[in-house]
Image: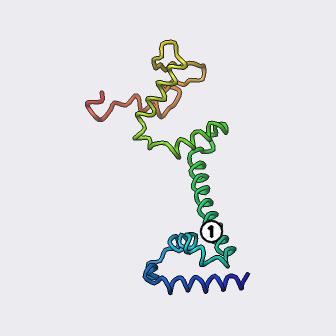
Amino acid sequence: MIKLFREFVTILEGVFVSNSRQFDVSKLQNRKLIQHMIESEGCKKFKGVRIVVHIILAACLKISIESIVESLVSRYVNHFSSCRQPNEDNALDEIIISENGPNLHEADDILERAMNKYWSENSQNGKWHFIRSGENIKTYFGGSSKVVGKMLSEPSKLPFMS
């Protein structure tokens, strides 16, 4: 393997010397070099050391995919805190939407279409309606939360809010 790597470095050096017009070494980027290695012309030059080129390409792919996965996992952890753990299907849907969907402040049209579709399938008249039901709904007027109750009892400092 060491012999193959030395041969690869020799070929690589030859590519730089023979193509000094194409490659400005001071501005050389890894991506350009790798692209040249897998193009038809470059592929012929690196034919004897294909295993080294394969290893380089596999490493590039692994690093790229690994960083994407780490980023997704980090966003997943931030999105679903310990107090908010949905079932697996819903969590997957939310992550796919947050990753591929529009930013929330640009999502009015798609949200409106989704709500129209939902209510047309789940409502008698197709109109939106939100009904509070259930026994576990807390009202925050007075005794259920001291902080919220205190905030609601204080008048606003802004005259137009009262």
Quarter of image, res 106: top left
Residue placed furthest toward the top:
124
Residue located at (66% from left, 70% from top):
54
Q: Nearer the viewer, residue 161 or 117?
A: 117
Residue placed furthest toward the left:
159
> Where the C terminus falls, by quadrant?
top left
Image colouring: rainbow
Residue located at (53% from left, 27% from top):
144
Q: Which of 65 and 49 is in front in this view?
A: 49
**Callout count:** 1
**Residue 141 visible, this orientation:** no
38 is higher (above) or lower (below) than 89: below
Could you tell me residue 21's position as x and y percent?
43, 82
Could you tell me residue 46's position as x and y percent?
62, 77
Residue located at (46% from left, 24% from top):
116
129 is higher (above) or lower (below) than 19: above
Q: Which amino acid does label 1 sit on?
A: Leu
**Residue 117 visible, this orientation:** yes
Could you tell me residue 121's position as x and y percent?
54, 20
161 is higher (above) or lower (below) than 16: above
SS of the residue at dot 1? helix
Mark 1, residue position: 57
Could you tell me residue 63's position as x and y percent?
61, 65
Residue located at (66% from left, 86% from top):
6
> Where the N terminus falls, by quadrant?
bottom right
**Around disc 1, counting alpha carbons within 10 Å, would you say few (fewer than 14), some (14 to 19), or many (20 or more)?**
some
Q: Which of 43 and 113 is in front in this view?
A: 43
Quarter of image, res 90: top right
Q: Nearer the viewer, residue 4 or 29?
A: 4
